[in-house]
Amino acid sequence: MSQVLDLVFMPDGRVINETYHDPAIPRVTGFQNYWVAADLGQANDFSAVTVIKDEALPVVDENRIIVGPRNWTVVYADRFRGVSYVDVVDHLIRLKNAHPFGGKSHLAIDGTSIGRVVSDMLQAQSVPHWAVTMTGGQDWSKKSGRYVNAGKTFMIENLAVMFAAGEIRFAHDLPLRAEIEADLASFSTETTAAGNQIITQSRSAAGHGDLGIALIVGAFASKYLRPQQMEVRQLKNYYG
């Protein structure tokens, strides 16, 4: 069996290996999705958007075709301010539907503060999305509909573990990479007098936090809010 597979990238995010109608070659289904994530700022603050490519592709492993390891790549980043929330919503919708994201992208926003307003505007246009409200604590839970509560410490630690494990990386030509790294470096862990760990942020000219928050939201959503997929196969060689 050739070690290089011809892969077919379907419009809905499925990735299938080409079998050329050979019954000896099993068809295996992986995926390639994109997570558009946004941190929304007040009128004079920056808003930021990042996009993470989330994929697990069919590969050959010891002459078997299997779904390979799951990998995340930060492929897009943008920061802007001085635009209306109507324009922000339009931008998110266009980005979500733009090539190559269209048809296989999910949207998650920081639902804290002004994020609630943007979420309502997206909902009014029937745009599926998650609104993630950052809370204290080290856990997360789905609320009604599109709303999710997640501990800020939990979310930051999730991204830190992904980087430490080599699961997520930056695209080599990613714009604003240095700014994202500065944002992430501005977060630190402190222990309170009661013995609880909390996340603090030092703000400087180099780190505003918005790009970092957008990436933190996207990484959390891709890891914990990804729609479950069920594959049905015919059971062969079974005799009851």
Image: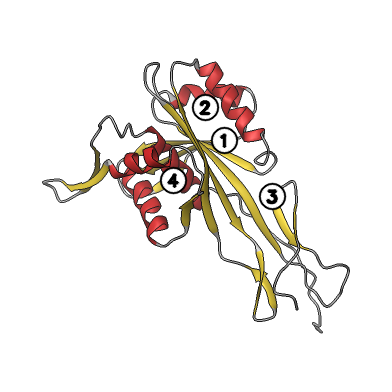
Q: Amino acid at mark 4?
A: Ser
- Report helix, strand or loop for mark 3: loop
Residue, disc 1: 129
Dot 4 alpha-carbon crowd within 10 angstroms: few under 14, some 14 to 19, many 20 or more: few
Dot 2 alpha-carbon crowd within 10 angstroms: few under 14, some 14 to 19, many 20 or more: many
Residue displayed at 64% across by 52% down: 32
Q: Earlier in the sequence, mark 2 or mark 3?
A: 3
Residue, disc 2: 119
The reply to whether the C-beta atoms of the residues labelled 3 and 4 are less than 8 Å apart is no
Q: Is residue 26 left or right of residue 200?
A: right
Q: CA distance from mark 1 to mark 4?
A: 16 Å
Give residue 141's mark.
Answer: 4
Q: CA distance from mark 3 to mark 4?
A: 26 Å
Q: Earlier in the sequence, mark 1 or mark 4?
A: 1
For residue 145, above or below residue 46: below
| Residue 74 screen position, x and y as percent | 50, 46
Q: CA distance from mark 2 to mark 3?
A: 24 Å
Residue, disc 3: 13
Q: Which one is in front, 57 or 155?
A: 57
- Report helix, strand or loop for mark 4: strand
Image quadrant holding the C terminus, namely bottom right
Residue displayed at 40% across by 47% down: 140
For residue 159, above or below residue 40: below
